[in-house]
Image (spheres, coloured by chain):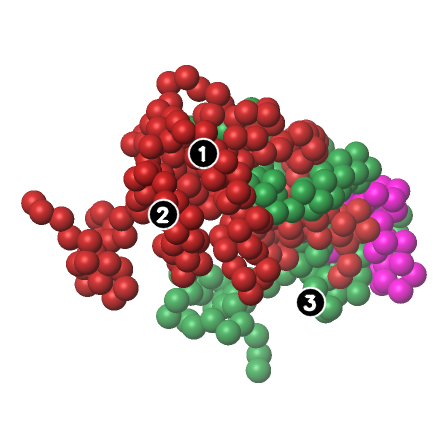
Chain colours: A green, B red
């Protein structure tokens, strides 16, 4: 069964969304066309506007439609503490914890020589420039706890070795609310190695 | 954490898609903006074009951007057999079985007096007109096996009582590949009542 060309085009286009397979795309297309054309038009406009107008914050490289994002522009943030992250989504995740009052720097990825992603591609020089301005006292490296994320963290730490900055890495360990039994070995090993005095 | 206005607008708009909650919408928005702006623009265009140009087939009421849909226009379909369905998605489902060569009529819903959905809202008069043209010899009612779908099926059968048409309902029974043990009572009762000679 082939759909009519426009419906097929919509189903195909919906597949670009992460987690949307052929069946979901089909359900979405028919749902919008059968019941909610206004929502379809609103979504169309929101997509176009965001894709055209959202760019990067010139200071922290997170997604923002203004030159300087809200967080970087805010006067209530502590500019001495800089948290380095892989993606704008991570900024959202950390902000939601309400436990960090500093500022951010978004790499937009991690080092990956195999894929040809080097220091320039993840804004390392921009990060070093930002740090050279002198306001930052502590750099908290919160790249993902993966092989690439760890390698990126080590690379950044290496670059900052000769500065007087405090360079830290977020703790790896047992997730809160988890059960030891179900935690993988690597995480448990990290949790043991990173143990703290009670 | 509030996103920047345009990102928030996109996240909210993505929630109109069935099965997309706040977290998925956020993931989709960031994925598109971080990695795939072209896909976002293509999706935007596909949504707008489909929402504006896709309408109903004047003969079978399925979704179509042409006045008469491909299936209704096809010369290879058997016009004596008319399958009545609740939604355009059902047409796709039946077509995918490759076991029906007739034509379709899409009600676009089912009778539901509580929600104020009467015969006029599901195109019953259009269905009767179509049948009155005389080409149809059998009407296969394939509304969903729900209370409302069954009620709608009975209503249509009632309307066609005085015609010479063969009016049938698709079989309810045990799904192929299922195990009796896990089939619900209502379905089993239907399967027994609808038993056939081997």
Q: How crowded is mark 1: few (under 14 residues within 10 Å), some or many (20 or more)?
A: few
- Residue in the foreground of this view, choosing between B81 and A40: B81
Alpha carbons under labels 3 and 2: distance apart:
66 Å
Residue closest to the far top: B75
Q: Do labels 2 and 1 share a chain?
A: yes
Chain for disc number 2: B
- Residue in the foreground of this view, choosing between A176 and B118: B118
The residue wearing badge 2 is B161
At numbered mark 3, what does the secondary structure look like: helix, strand or loop? helix
Give the left or right position of residue A132, taking residue A155 as reference. Answer: right
- Residue in the foreground of this view, choosing between A74 and B107: B107
Which numbered circle lies on residue A116?
none
Q: Inspect this view and state whether residue A121 appears.
A: no
Residue A106: give x, y in percent of width and height. 73, 47
Residue B37: give x, y in percent of width and height. 69, 33
Q: Residue at x 50, y 55 (%)?
A: B111
Q: Is residue A80 magenta?
A: yes
Q: What stretch is highlighted in magenta?
A: A58-83
Lower sequence index among marks 2 and 1: 1
Alpha carbons under labels 2 and 1: distance apart:
13 Å
Q: Which residue is drawn at 85% across and 63% down?
A: A78
Q: In which quarter of the image is residue B93?
A: top left
Residue closest to the far front: B162
Q: Residues within 10 Å of mark 3 (few under 14, many from 20)?
A: few
Chain for disc number 1: B
Residue A177: give x, y in percent of width and height. 50, 74
Chain for disc number 3: A
């Amino acid at each position: 069964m082939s759909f009519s060309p426009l419906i097929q085009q919509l189903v195909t286009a919906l597949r670009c969304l992460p987690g949307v397979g052929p069946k979901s795309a089909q359900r979405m297309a028919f749902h919008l066309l059968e019941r909610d054309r206004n929502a379809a038009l609103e979504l169309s406009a929101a997509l176009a506007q965001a894709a055209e107008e959202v760019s990067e914050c010139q200071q922290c490289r997170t997604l923002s439609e203004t030159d300087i994002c809200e967080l970087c522009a805010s006067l209530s943030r502590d500019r001495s503490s800089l948290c380095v992250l892989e993606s704008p989504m991570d900024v959202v995740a950390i902000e939601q914890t309400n436990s960090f009052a500093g500022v951010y720097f978004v790499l937009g990825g991690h080092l990956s020589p195999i894929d040809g992603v080097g220091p320039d591609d993840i804004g390392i020089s921009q990060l070093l420039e930002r740090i050279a301005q002198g306001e930052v006292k502590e750099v908290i490296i919160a790249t993902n706890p993966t092989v690439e994320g760890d390698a990126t963290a080590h690379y950044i730490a290496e670059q900052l070795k000769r500065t007087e900055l405090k360079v830290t890495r977020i703790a790896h360990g047992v997730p809160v609310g988890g059960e030891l039994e179900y935690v993988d070995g690597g995480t448990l090993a990290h949790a043991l190695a990173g143990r703290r005095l009670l």
